[in-house]
Image (cartoon, rainbow, N blue to C red):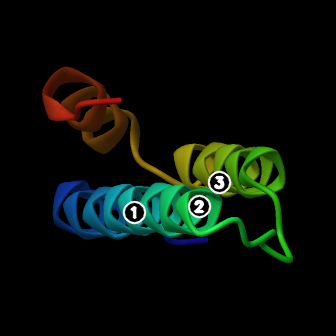
Amino acid sequence: MKKFNIQDRVILDEMIDNFTMEMHKNQDESELIGRRPIITRQYWLEMIKQVQEKIDELTTKKALSHSNQYRNK
């Protein structure tokens, strides 16, 4: 099985980070207008964590080290 290299990992990190940022923005906006989102913030965070763990498992050691060094978690 091919593992994610540094280039793959940079793209995946960017996608996860952007999704997380948009999720928080959506959740915050829902709270401001008094609307209850269908999926809770806590559920999204747990799902993001699980996806991140799976990506970590499929990442080369060098790419994972690079990601951990440069990424704002």
Front one among 29 and 10? 29
Task: Please give the label number shown on residue 4.
Answer: 1
Q: Earlier in the sequence, mark 1 or mark 3?
A: 1
Image coordinates for residue 61, horizontal then vertical, percent: 39, 34
- Relative to 61, residue 26 above or below: below
Q: Which residue is mark 2?
A: 27
Position of the C terminus, as image quadrant, is top left
For the residues bearing labels 1 and 3, Cβ distance under 8 angstroms:
no
Position of the N terminus, as image quadrant, is bottom right
Task: Please give the label number shown on residue 65.
Answer: none
Image coordinates for residue 12, horizontal then vertical, percent: 36, 66
Q: Residues within 10 Å of mark 3 (few under 14, many from 20)?
A: some
Question: What is the secondary structure assignment of the residue under circle 1?
Answer: loop
Structural distance between the alpha carbons of marks 1 and 3: 18 Å
On screen, residue 41 versus residue 10, left or right, reads right
Disc 3 marks a residue whose amino acid type is Ile
